[in-house]
Image (cartoon, rainbow, N blue to C red):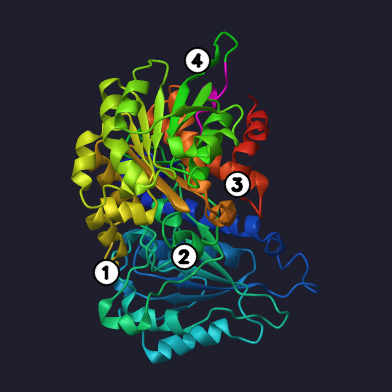
């Protein structure tokens, strides 16, 4: 399972490696620079031929490299030196006081000066003359082949200050005389982006400029991807991401955020078990005309492998539901007493409350369902109306929850239960590390005492002990067609079915979210929620189950 690191975690890994004596900072910088060059040629193979190989066919490729005041800038000098050695034309800019560069960055700055010149930019406030210099380089008749952003990387904790106006006004859509678009490369993370939250850092004193960051077509992180590349604005600004290894070891830690992946070994069924051996899920439905969401959830729970699924339906909707179901069963449940009585049956292993339930019905049933399920150690998924019904008294809900529960709020439902955390996410990010969706989900899980799955393109799943997963349907993995009515109900059903089968809440939520995303990708555009469960057979076959 791959980790997503914060800036502090990455720095700690690097420091530990250097302190052990196994590698020096200069060696890491050299490996990083080589990794960026390799990634450029992997992303754009047409750039990989040396100009000396085809002198009459191919013009000399050119790179404009913007180096900043830290080690990210040092990486930029290494990239320039390596490309220069391959025959590239390099224009090097330094947005820093060269006398105050860190030792390793200063060494590579001086090495570069033996090969070419550096245009020093006024620091920290970029002057108008400096901005014109950069623009002229980007707008030359032939134009640069690439722009390398080696300005700030993961260490940025403040808005871009003197560079903000230039970044805001410059479109960076320059084309050369052959019509080729400028290709932008970010080292580790696009400058202006908080590496922990994926949010663009803002300066309230320059509110008229809005948010400013340097977008990339290719981002090259080292060792592991950083959280900010998949959260919030990160995926939109980062372009293609190619992780490069630089020879670092990493200790195990439950506090590292991990990329979500399915528990494949637990998805298959064994021939020795009968249907009750694979769990029985109970999903409560709303009244007449409001049963579709629960039926979607039930279909999802059944398709993902629950042995049996029963819909708990009020009297007013029994005829409606019975006309639409076959493999899914139905049980009349009018009130909390009927739900408690039904849950006495030990064969029920998981309960889902919320999809299409209706606020009035939710208020009558959630308390009874949680109390009965908690007393018998049954897993519970709470979604939609089950969450919204406690918007005015979230603490009442938290008091009833237990460790076997999973909450699956979207942003609006999350704000109703955790308004203070939602407000922190909405507030402008004035400094880094900025408050992130990972921070919000972890704090929410701690407060609720159960797993919280915060839905979105960058879905975050957190447990009360701090374990966290990110299921990011962003960038090349984006599935925008999931934004359709009922898709969240199917996700609730997937998780309920996996809980019924005996998965722990974090694993069930992680696996359900991953399968949900893959089902949407498998179907493609024009998806509607009913299509999601029907992708399970093909996905299981592809997984070798």
Counting other residues with Cα less than 10 Å from the Cα at mark 4, is it few (<14), some (14-19), or many (20 or more)? some
Labels 2 & 4 near each other (Cβ < 8 A) = no
* Label drawn at residue 430: 1
Element type at mark 4:
helix
Element type at mark 1:
loop
On the image, the x and y values in percent for residue 279 come to: 47, 20
Closest to the camera, between mark 2 and mark 4, is: 4
Q: Is residue 539 magenta?
A: no
Closest to the camera, between mark 1 and mark 3, is: 3
Q: Is residue 262 magenta?
A: yes
Disc 1 from disc 3: Cα separation: 36 Å
Query: In the image, what residue occupies the spot 76% across and 72% down?
Result: 58
Disc 3 from disc 4: Cα separation: 29 Å
Residues shaded magenta = 261-269
> Where does label 4 land, which residue?
276
Counting other residues with Cα less than 10 Å from the Cα at mark 2, is it few (<14), some (14-19), or many (20 or more)? many
* Label drawn at residue 520: 3
Disc 2 from disc 3: Cα separation: 39 Å
Element type at mark 2:
helix
């Amino acid at each position: 399972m791959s980790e997503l690191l914060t800036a502090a975690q990455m720095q700690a890994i690097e420091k530990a490696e250097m302190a052990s004596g196994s590698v020096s900072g200069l060696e890491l910088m050299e490996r990083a620079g080589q990794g960026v060059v390799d990634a450029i040629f992997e992303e754009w193979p047409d750039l990989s031929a040396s100009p000396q190989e085809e002198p009459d066919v191919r013009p000399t490729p050119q790179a404009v490299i913007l180096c900043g005041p830290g080690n990210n800038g040092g990486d930029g000098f290494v990239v320039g030196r390596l490309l220069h050695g391959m025959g590239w034309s390099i224009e090097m800019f330094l947005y820093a006081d060269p006398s105050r560069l860190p030792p390793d960055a200063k060494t590579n700055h001086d090495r570069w000066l033996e090969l070419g010149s550096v245009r020093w930019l006024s620091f920290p406030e970029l002057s108008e003359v400096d901005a014109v210099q950069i623009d002229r380089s980007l707008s030359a008749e032939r134009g640069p082949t690439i722009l390398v952003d080696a300005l700030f990387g993961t260490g940025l904790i403040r808005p871009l200050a003197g560079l903000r106006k230039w970044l805001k006004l410059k479109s960076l859509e320059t084309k050369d005389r052959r019509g080729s678009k400028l290709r932008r490369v970010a080292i580790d993370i696009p400058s202006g982006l908080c590496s922990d939250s994926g949010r663009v850092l803002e300066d309230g004193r320059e509110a008229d400029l809005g948010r400013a960051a340097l977008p990339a077509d290719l981002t090259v992180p080292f060792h592991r991807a950083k959280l900010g590349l998949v959260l919030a604005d990160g995926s939109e600004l980062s372009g293609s991401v190619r992780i490069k290894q630089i020879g670092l070891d990493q200790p195990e830690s439950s506090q590292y955020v991990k990329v979500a992946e399915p528990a494949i070994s637990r998805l298959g069924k064994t021939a020795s078990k009968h249907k009750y051996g694979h769990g029985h899920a109970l999903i409560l439905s709303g009244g007449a005309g409001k049963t579709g969401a629960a039926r979607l959830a039930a279909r999802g729970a059944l398709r993902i492998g629950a042995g049996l699924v029963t819909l708990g339906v009020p009297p007013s909707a029994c005829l409606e539901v019975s006309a639409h179901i076959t493999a899914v069963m139905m049980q009349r449940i009018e009130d909390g007493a009927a739900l408690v009585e039904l849950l006495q049956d030990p064969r029920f292993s998981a309960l889902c409350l919320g999809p299409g339930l209706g606020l009035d019905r939710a208020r009558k049933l959630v308390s009874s369902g949680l109390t009965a399920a908690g007393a018998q150690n049954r897993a519970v998924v709470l979604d939609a109306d089950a969450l919204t019904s406690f918007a005015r008294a979230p603490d009442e809900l938290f008091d009833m929850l237990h460790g076997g529960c999973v909450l699956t709020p979207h942003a609006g439902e999350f704000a109703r239960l955790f308004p203070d955390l939602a407000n922190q996410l909405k507030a402008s990010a004035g400094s880094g590390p900025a408050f992130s969706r990972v921070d919000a989900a972890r704090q929410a899980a701690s407060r609720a005492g159960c797993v919280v799955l915060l839905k979105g393109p960058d879905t975050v799943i957190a447990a009360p002990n701090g374990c966290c997963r990110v299921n990011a349907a962003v960038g090349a993995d984006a599935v925008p067609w999931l934004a359709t009515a009922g898709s969240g109900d199917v996700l609730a059903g997937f998780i309920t079915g996996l809980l019924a089968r005996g998965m722990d809440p974090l694993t069930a939520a992680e696996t359900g979210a991953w399968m949900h995303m893959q089902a949407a990708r498998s179907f493609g555009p024009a998806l509607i929620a009913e299509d999601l469960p029907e992708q399970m057979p093909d996905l299981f076959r592809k997984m070798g189950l």
